[in-house]
Amino acid sequence: MSTVRGGRRRCRHALVNFGMAFVASLVQVAVGWCAEPRFFDHSLLIAPEYPCTWPSHPFPRFALIRSRTIGAESAFNIDTLLIDGNTGTQLDVPPHSVARPELKREKSGPLGLAYTDKIEPWQFGGEACVVDIRDLLDKAPNGISPLVKPEHVERFEKQHRPVRFGDVVLFRSDYSDRYYQPLPEGRRFIADVLDKKAPGYPDPDPDCMEFLGKRGVLALGTDSASMGPLPDLAEPTHFAGLKYGMVWTEGATNLKELPATGAFYCLLGPKHEGGPYGEGRAFSIVGGDLPRRLIDSCRNKRAIDLSPTLSPKLPLTSPGAGTGQHRQTYLKIDFLYAEYLDMWHHGHWMDAMAGTHLVPPAFALPADTTPVPYAPEVRGWLEEYEKRYGQRGTSRRTTEQVPIDWTCGEARVVDVRALVGSTKPSQWPASPEITVEHLRGYEQQHGDLRAGDVVVFHTGHNDRYLRPMPADTGLWLDPLNGKAEGWPAPGPDAIIYLKKKGVRCVASDAPDLGGVDPKRALMTYWTLGSQDMVGVEFLVNVGKIPAKGAYFLFAAVKVRDCHGGPGRAIVLY
């Protein structure tokens, strides 16, 4: 009788498991057929009290410094970041383990030059294939990682389909969801594992990497703290995958929101010169036709990079007009030498608006209604502004509070290059103003602007003047000091018009959206903030964007309470 009852129990368990799997498949189908696409953030919050940096000596701790706050000295909130590529959710590229070819070492090869500024943008995205490895979580001794093996991927393939080129294989253990907590509890994320006080995070072994590399997969992701199993397989696993030219996400989170297949997944991050890894922002799009469209673009390598390389040689931040008005320059900071790779691990000391970056509402708006002790001149500008446009408003919307879908959308490129040369030298410093009439003229030729579009102003300024020192004065210095015309920039009326159209994000291939006249620039930023809109500044290559069918993607690094946000912009078409 016990055998019969045991058989019945097994049968019931089998039916329950089948029912759960069937319901899960129906949920995935329903998500896939959802008419409207939904965006999900898969990035860890970067903040000093979180375990967002690698805790071992001599890796630098993350720091956000308030360089200036809104008041008598500044009309803007200006932040500086000390950050290295092993911070938060991050990107690894081949030179992390593949040596440069000229070193002629066993692990040398051409991919040793494929730094973060060299990887083609189509490789950052693809179809998410979520390999469920939750059964491995904490299933190992302290200090040791449970290993993801080829059979775990084969299990996925039996349930769904074979993985292939154009996929982003994501290992879901829910490790970061559970253990990425404020300190001291957050020591469980990395430090307790290194100290052998807790089981390691699940990660693929070298055989699994070889399996995926031979399948043609070039992008992976894990919601563990690293793609390297502890204690002694980190480097073998890294090299096993990176030698194929793979890139991957470390420190992803919230993978539970993804169906097993069918979602578009992407990781975007600052484009550091010579970077073997970099801080990034991971997100996905689920539902409707958009994921399939973007997956197809990546699979067919149809992508345009819109961000300049971040390099100390380039004028990536404003020098200001007058002594002492400059923003923090972009600096590379070496801290650990890797002898085999003949390379320094490095971080960066940088303005939060270096290179391509986000402008959140809180950049120009105070957090509350407490009177701001602006300089007398700025108080006069505020009175003039509020008489014409109404209350300036307040905002606490810093970078991490800007939804990713605000900075993604159909690219609507408004060519304003005809404005170049339209001001008189006697008026300088001055920028030609992009007006409502220019926007209406665009709509007459290209159709109405619609809610969710990303309006990109094509000025041509950065492509023409972004040059290394000493040939760099044409970008910022000459226009700011009245020696040359400023770049075209929208005025407040243009911003208000775009808001009425449902546009949330305005971008430009100029250094900024304000222009060189400080009064008008401030009014433009006040308007962006009061309309709860965002900007993406400092693009390049905008002229390469197709007139139709181009989708703009930008994501800023998820730094808490940041009034800027370095990131990367691409277009898929």
Image: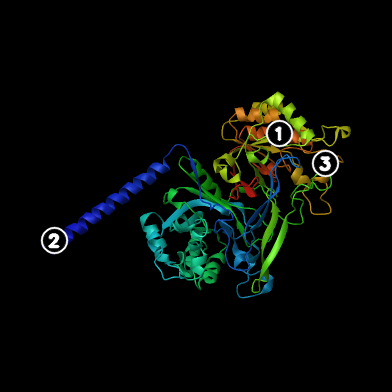
Q: Please identify the residue farthest to the top as the structure is shown.
A: 387
Q: Position of residue 329 (x, y in %)?
A: 75, 53
Residue 418 visible at all: no
Q: Check the picture and name the quadrant holding the N terminus.
A: bottom left
Q: Which mark is residue 524?
A: 1
Tell me which residue sits at (76%, 34%) in the image.
Answer: 378
Q: Secondary structure at mark 3?
A: helix
Identify which residue, 439 or 200, lies in the foreground. 200
The residue that label 2 is drawn on is 4
Local SS, label 2: helix
Q: Is residue 520 left or right of residue 484?
A: left
Which image quadrant is residue 133 in? Answer: bottom left
Query: What is the CA distance from the residue labelled 2 to the residue labelled 1?
Result: 77 Å
Label 1 close to label 3 by CB (< 8 Å): no
How was the colour assigned to the protein in this rendering? Answer: rainbow
Point out residue 384 in the picture as x, y percentages from the top left corner: 74, 27
Looking at the image, can residue 341 be seen? yes
* Residue at mark 1 to residue at mark 3: CA–CA distance: 18 Å
What residue is drawn where x is 17% and y is 60%? 7
- The residue type indicated by label 3 comes to Pro
SS label for mark 1: helix
Pointer 3 residue: 479
Q: Position of residue 179 (x, y in %)?
A: 47, 58
Q: Earlier in the sequence, mark 2 or mark 1?
A: 2
